[in-house]
C-alpha cells in the first residue's frame, strides 16, 4: 500500500518568514495530494490540494509543488502569521485503492 | 450547507457499554468515511462507504460496526471497546472518485474506561 513520509516533524519560524514542509510517497499511481491544517482540538481542514496533472498550485500565501518523477510534494507558506501555527498533514490518494494515506504531521509554530 | 456534523462531541463509556457515533452531511456527497485519530498522530482510515455500501474495511475489529442508513447519514456502533480504543473519531465525506476532496467533521472524542 501507499506510504507517506513527512518532514520535519516540528518547525519553528519567526513571523514573516517562510515555512516549507516536504512529503514523499511510495505509490507511483497516486494522483491526488491534499494538505490539511489541524488546530488543537479541531477538525483537519483542507488548505490546498494538487492533482497529478499539474506541478504547482498557489493560493495567496500558500503554494504546493509536485514532482511525480521523484514522488515528492511540498507545502510552502510565505509571510507566516501566528494563526498559521497548527499541525499540518500531507496526504496521498492511492491510485489503486481510492484510499487517503496521511503523513505523520508537522507541528508548525510561528513566533512573534 | 458545506459542513459535516458529528454527535456527540464527547463520549465516555465503559468496556461493557454499547454506544453509537453519528455523522451527517448535506453536501450531496456519496462517499463517507470513518477515521480514528490518536493524540499527535495522523488520522487512520477505518471504513469507507460508497453509494451507501461498505467498500473498504481496514481490518477494523468487529467491536466497531459501521452503518450507512442513507446518503446523508453514517453511524459507528461501538460495543465492548477497550481502553486503547480511546481516540478522536472523525467522519468525512466526499464525492465518489479518486481525486475528490474529503471534508472532515469536528470529531467525537471517545474515552473508554
Image (cartoon, coloured by chain):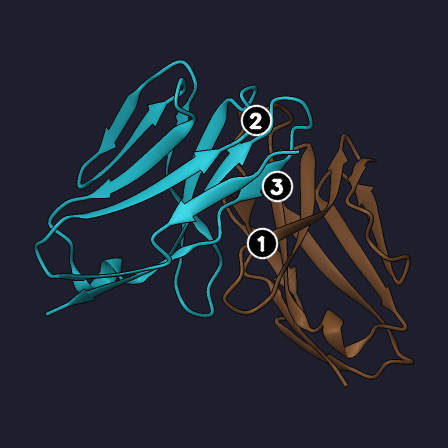
Chain colours: A cyan, B brown
The residue beneath circle 2 is A27
Element class at badge 2: loop
**In the rendered view, does A8 fall on the left or right side of B40?**
left
**In the rendered view, does A48 fall on the left or right side of B9?**
left
Chain letter belonging to callout 2: A
Query: Which residue is found at the position 34% from the left and 53% from the top?
Result: A8
The residue beneath circle 3 is B93
- Say few, some or many: other residues with alpha carbon within 10 Å of mark 3 (under 14 / 14 to 19 / 20 or more): many
Q: Is label 3 or label 2 in front?
A: 2
Query: Which residue is found at the position 65% from the left and 26% from the top?
Result: B96
Is residue A103 or residue B54 the one in the foreground? A103
Q: Tell me, yes or no, if residue B15 can be seen here.
A: yes
Q: Determine which quarter of the picture holds residue A83.
A: bottom left
In the displayed image of the protein, which residue is found farthest to the top? A53
Element class at badge 1: loop
Q: Tell me, yes or no, if residue B26 can be seen here.
A: no
Instruction: Give the CA separation, mark 3 to mark 2.
Output: 23 Å
Q: Determine which quarter of the picture holds residue A105.
A: bottom left
Is residue B12 or residue A7 the one in the foreground? A7
Element class at badge 3: strand
- Say few, some or many: other residues with alpha carbon within 10 Å of mark 2 (under 14 / 14 to 19 / 20 or more): some
Q: Do labels 3 and 2 share a chain?
A: no
Q: Is label 2 or label 1 in front?
A: 2
Q: Where is residue A92 in the image (x, y as percent from the top left)?
A: 51, 34
The residue beneath circle 1 is B43
Chain letter belonging to callout 3: B
Instruction: Give the CA separation, mark 2 to mark 1.
Output: 19 Å
Query: Which residue is found at the position 57% from the left and 39% from the top?
Result: A3
Q: Position of residue B99 (x, y in %)?
A: 53, 24
Chain letter belonging to callout 1: B
Amino acid at each position: 500500500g501507499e506510504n507517506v513520509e513527512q518532514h520535519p516533524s516540528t518547525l519553528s519560524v519567526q513571523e514573516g518568514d517562510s515555512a516549507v514542509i516536504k512529503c514523499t510517497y511510495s505509490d507511483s499511481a497516486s494522483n491526488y495530494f491534499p494538505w490539511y491544517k489541524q488546530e488543537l482540538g479541531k477538525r483537519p481542514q483542507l488548505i490546498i490540494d494538487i492533482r497529478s496533472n499539474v506541478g504547482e498550485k498557489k493560493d495567496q500565501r500558500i503554494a504546493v509543488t509536485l514532482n511525480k518523477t521523484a514522488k515528492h510534494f511540498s507545502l510552502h507558506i510565505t509571510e507566516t502569521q501566528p494563526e498559521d501555527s497548527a499541525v499540518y498533514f500531507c496526504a496521498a490518494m492511492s491510485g489503486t485503492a481510492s484510499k487517503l494515506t496521511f503523513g505523520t504531521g508537522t507541528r508548525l509554530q510561528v513566533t512573534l | 450547507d458545506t459542513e459535516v456534523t458529528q454527535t456527540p462531541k464527547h463520549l465516555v463509556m465503559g468496556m461493557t457499554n454499547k454506544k453509537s457515533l453519528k455523522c451527517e452531511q448535506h453536501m450531496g456527497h456519496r462517499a463517507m468515511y470513518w477515521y480514528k485519530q490518536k493524540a499527535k498522530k495522523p488520522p487512520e482510515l477505518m471504513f469507507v462507504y460508497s453509494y451507501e455500501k461498505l467498500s473498504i474495511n481496514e481490518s477494523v475489529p468487529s467491536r466497531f460496526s459501521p452503518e450507512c442508513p442513507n446518503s446523508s447519514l453514517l453511524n459507528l456502533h461501538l460495543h465492548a471497546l477497550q481502553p486503547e480504543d480511546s481516540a478522536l473519531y472523525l467522519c468525512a465525506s466526499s464525492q465518489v472518485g479518486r481525486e475528490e476532496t474529503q471534508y472532515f467533521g469536528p470529531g467525537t472524542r471517545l474515552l473508554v474506561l
